[in-house]
Image (tube, rainbow, N blue to C red):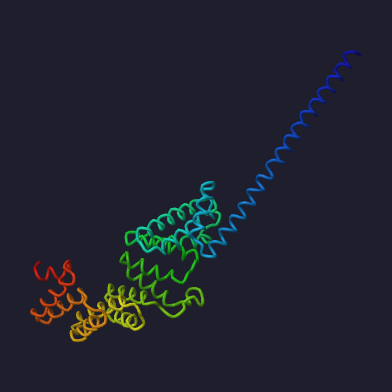
Amino acid sequence: MLKVKNRFGYKTHLRRNNIIRWTAIAAALIGLVTVLVPVFAGRISRSGNERQILLRLWEEGAYGEALAMSKAALAERPMDYFLLTIHGFSAYQIGIAQINNFDTLTYIDECIWSLRKALLSKNSALNNRANNGRVYYVLGKAYYYKGVDYADLAVKYLEEAREASYFARDTAEYLGLSYAAVHDYRSSVAAFTLALDPASYEAGEQESGPSDTLLLAIAHSYIALGDQDLAKAYLLRCIEISRDSQRVTAARLLFAGILKNEGDFEEAEAQYTIILNESGENAEVHYQLGELYAARGDTTRARAEWRRAIRIDPAHKGARERLGM
């Protein structure tokens, strides 16, 4: 009987110890949850407030503040999709507003770094291609601003944006310019055709027809394709609507060049004269006038125009070569 009693006493003791142990574990877990819940709740709340503040700053156009705030937050969460996109978009907006080209490229590089990283994040994969459309669009424009050496990447990401069904008012125009930069003029003209048709994009986005920049770019592409008649039509339209003297001069120079190549020397000379009367002395105009007189066999007047070009611009390569300098 003594052995039985001891056995039951041992079991009771063991059960009591187990109860005490599990009670202690449960108490520790409750204590841990009590400590961690406010911490995580605070982080979630802080994250939510942070997102709202960043969105408000972005909507208000406070890009500098949005850039600084997102950069600070990225120190803790370097692969956060939302922070990376806000950071990249803000850097782009600040970059294109710069006057100095070096400053522009500094911000553009930061934009590209941030948005490329966003596309590598886990949230990017979850958002899939359709939801990344705006990221592709801004990346494409950013690469366009980096210059002709990056035009192929501008084309790549702008086309990605189109495939993701993300359309903006200037997507087609940037696509046309980027295709022209890589000498794909047929694709350039196709994109510019879309830019001239706002119905293909967001209704009501186009405010007052194509810009002089767009018309001049289209003309360049048609010249490259050898379609001089269409090129002349776009150049004349550019001259008609533009209020920018430099663009008007560029359009008249191209228009006069086409006329000269077609043998219409009189009308070409009239265009060069208009430029000189409206914009003052211009080395390129005098050089082209010299080319026109040379084509007509008047070498005396031709050499006189080339000398005028050099007086205005001593480094003018064409005029110096013509005069054997």
Would you say 82 lies left or right of 43 here? Answer: left
Q: Could you tell me which quadrant the N terminus lies in?
A: top right
- The answer to which of 295 and 94 lies nearer the viewer is 94
**Outermost residue, top side:** 2
> In the rendered view, would you say 19 is above or below 159?
above
Residue at 13% across, 79% down: 295
Looking at the rendering, which quadrant does residue 109 occupy? bottom left
**Outermost residue, right side:** 1
Looking at the rendering, which quadrant does residue 34 occupy? top right
> In the rendered view, would you say 6 is above or below 274?
above
Q: Position of residue 205 (x, y in %)?
A: 49, 75
Residue at 47% across, 52% down: 117
Q: Position of residue 230 (x, y in %)?
A: 31, 80
Q: Position of residue 231 (x, y in %)?
A: 30, 79
> In the rendered view, would you say 140 is above or below 44?
below
How many numbered circles does the render carry?
0
Q: Could you tell me which quadrant the C terminus lies in?
A: bottom left
Residue at 73% across, 37% down: 31
Q: Position of residue 290 (x, y in %)?
A: 14, 77
- The answer to which of 257 and 242 lies nearer the viewer is 242
Looking at the rendering, which quadrant does residue 249 occupy? bottom left
